Amino acid sequence: MDNARYRGPAVVLHWLIAALIIVNVVLAWTWDRLPDAAVRPVIDVHKSIGITVLGLALMRLLWRASHYPPALPAAYHGWEKFLSHAVHGLLYLVMFGLPLSGWIMDSAWKNAATHPMAWFGLFEWPRLAPIVHLDPAVKERIHHLFGAAHSLSADALYALVFLHVGGALKHQFLDGESELQRMWFARR
């Protein structure tokens, strides 16, 4: 096995999480343009994807904690290695922060009791009980606070993905490193 490549589970989790995040961004950017009857189902899918990303990010973190990633190429400058580690760390923070802030926001939503959350329509996903049972005025403040955190986290995600993809493309095409192959499926 090539030691410069990520292992299969890391690659699968990376691309699965990336694809789900892209779908969720597209959903969030489009539901304001949908007819009223379509908005709630799209938001429900968005929530389901968010919870799925949270679970997959936890799996990825556990994998990462038990399997060392391949070393960065020796040709990378110190600042590039630092920036790579910083962006990856912040991406992990956002992969947890976005779904958690959304889940908290949803749990504090004033209509949560009349609109149960179902994971892809298959089974009811619980809201966070300590939040659900709070005073309505407190829940409204939490809803707004975590809605703002969710929005800021989304903005951070866009910037971090730009840096992550931009860095990978720079190393691949300007520096001549096999950067994209490190996180792609190995040929048999």
Image (tube, helix red, strand yellow):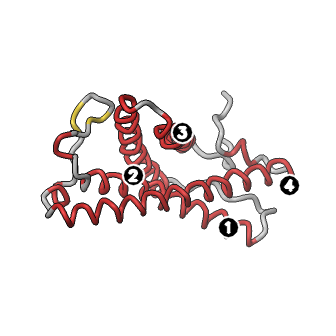
Q: Residues within 10 Å of mark 3 (few under 14, many from 20)?
A: few
Tell me which numbered mark, 2 or 1, is placed earlier along the sequence: 1
Q: Distance between the residues labelled 2 and 1?
A: 24 Å
Estimate the spatial distance between the alpha carbons at disc 3 and disc 1, rounded to whole Å: 27 Å
What amino acid does circle 1 point to?
Leu
Left or right of residue 146: residue 186: right
Label 3: which residue? Answer: 26
Q: Residues within 10 Å of mark 1 (few under 14, many from 20)?
A: some
Q: Mark 4 points at which residue?
A: 175
Q: Mark 2 points at which residue?
A: 99
Q: Nearer the viewer, mark 2 or mark 3?
A: 3
The residue lying at 24 percent from left, 41 percent from top is 125
Amino acid type at mark 4: Asp
Amino acid type, callout 2: Pro
Whole-Å distance between the Cαs marked 2 and 3?
16 Å
Q: Are marks 4 and 3 in contact (CB under 8 Å)?
A: no
